[in-house]
Structures are given as C-alpha cells and as structure tokens.
Image (cartoon, helix red, strand yellow):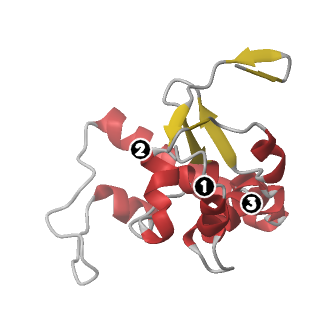
Amino acid sequence: MVLFNQKIINFLSSDFYGDLCHFNTDWFREYDWLECSVTKDAAFCLYCYLFQDESINQGGGDVFSTIGFTSWNKKRSLEVHIGNPNSVHNQSRRNCEDLLRQKQSIQGAFAKQSDQQKLEYRTHLEAAINVTRYLLKQGLSFRGHREDVSSSNRGNYIELLT
C-alpha cells in the first residue's frame, strides 16, 4: 500500500528471490513517460504505447508498450528502455512532442494560409457544391464512361467544374 497524490494505492508485491518488490512511485518524478496500471500491476511507456510501430520490439519496447514492465527490482531496465538518442523510445517521444506543438497542428497550418489562399479555397468549394446541387436537381449522373484526360466527355461533374 502506497500513498500517492493523496490516494492510497495497493500495488501487488512480487517475490524476487526472497525480496518483496512493488512499483516505486518515485519513478514518476524521474521518468515523465512512465504510466502505471494498478489493475495489471505493470508499468508502461506512454510514448511507445501511443506511437508504436513495427520496430517497437527493439530494446524490449513491447514490454513497455504492450505487455507491461513488472520487474520492479530492475530499475536499470528503465534506462535501457530509453536507450540512445535514435532509439525507438526517443523517436516516439519526438513524435509525441511534435504532435503537441501548437504550430505544427492542423489548425495552425490553416491559420498560416494567406487570405488569397482562403478565398481561392472558398471559391472552389462553392463551385463544387453548386455543381453537385445542379446535378442532383436535374437527376444527372456525375461520372462519365471514361474520365481520363484524352476523353472528349469526362462526365458531367468534371466537365462542369473545368
């Protein structure tokens, strides 16, 4: 039983050669990526869990992303998991930081568009909606038999938009 953030948490103790060990809450302060599941009695790497790919098995990554770390007597394994600057863990960390950076978000990208680009986008969108409404009201097909560039009639939708 451990007091953490004003809550009492019951971590199961594991027997390692006569020593009873359990998750150490001090590790949260040292490793900002560490997450702990009380129900699974295991620790996980938030970065590797969110951004795992086919290379996650390198450096025991699957232990920290899927299986769960339970070797409470082997704190060194946490350092091994972090690895070198190009490790899977550090790549996942960078991916997470990139996602959280406001300037790289989709909303940020739209905000950077010039007024001219926004006007052109709106004009194209309105034209597409008007053509769609016209074809629906007339009961006409959108597609033609052949829509490639060499075709003389590429379909009602494409012909009306170009």
Q: Earlier in the sequence, mark 3 or mark 2?
A: 3
Seen in the picture, residue 138 relative to 123 is either above or below; the reply is above
Q: From where the camera sits, is residue 65 visible?
A: yes
Please provide percent x and percent y for residue 94.
69, 67
Q: Which residue is mark 1?
A: 74
Q: Mark 3 is on which residue type? A: Glu
Spatial distance from mark 1 to mark 3, Cα to Cα? Answer: 28 Å
The secondary structure type at the circle numbered 2 is helix
91 or 146: which is nearer to us?
Answer: 91
The residue drawn where x is 69% and y is 55% is 106
For label 1, count other residues whose C-alpha is less than 10 Å away and answer few (under 14), some (14-19) or many (20+): few
Q: Which residue is mark 3?
A: 97
Q: Earlier in the sequence, mark 2 or mark 1?
A: 1
Seen in the picture, residue 154 relative to 96 is either above or below; the reply is below
For label 2, count other residues whose C-alpha is less than 10 Å away and answer few (under 14), some (14-19) or many (20+): some
Q: Which mark is residue 39?
A: none
Q: Which residue is mark 2?
A: 132
Q: Nearer the viewer, mark 3 or mark 2?
A: 3
Seen in the picture, residue 18 relative to 121 is either above or below; the reply is above
109 or 39: which is nearer to us?
Answer: 39
Quadrant in the rendering for residue 53: bottom left
Q: Earlier in the sequence, mark 1 or mark 3?
A: 1
Q: Residue furthest front?
A: 18
Spatial distance from mark 3 to mark 2, Cα to Cα? Answer: 41 Å
Q: Mark 1 is on which residue type? A: Lys
Quadrant (top left, top right, bottom left, bottom right) of the N terminus: top right
Please provide percent x and percent y for residue 30.
82, 52
Please provide percent x and percent y for residue 108.
79, 57
110 or 16: which is nearer to us?
Answer: 16
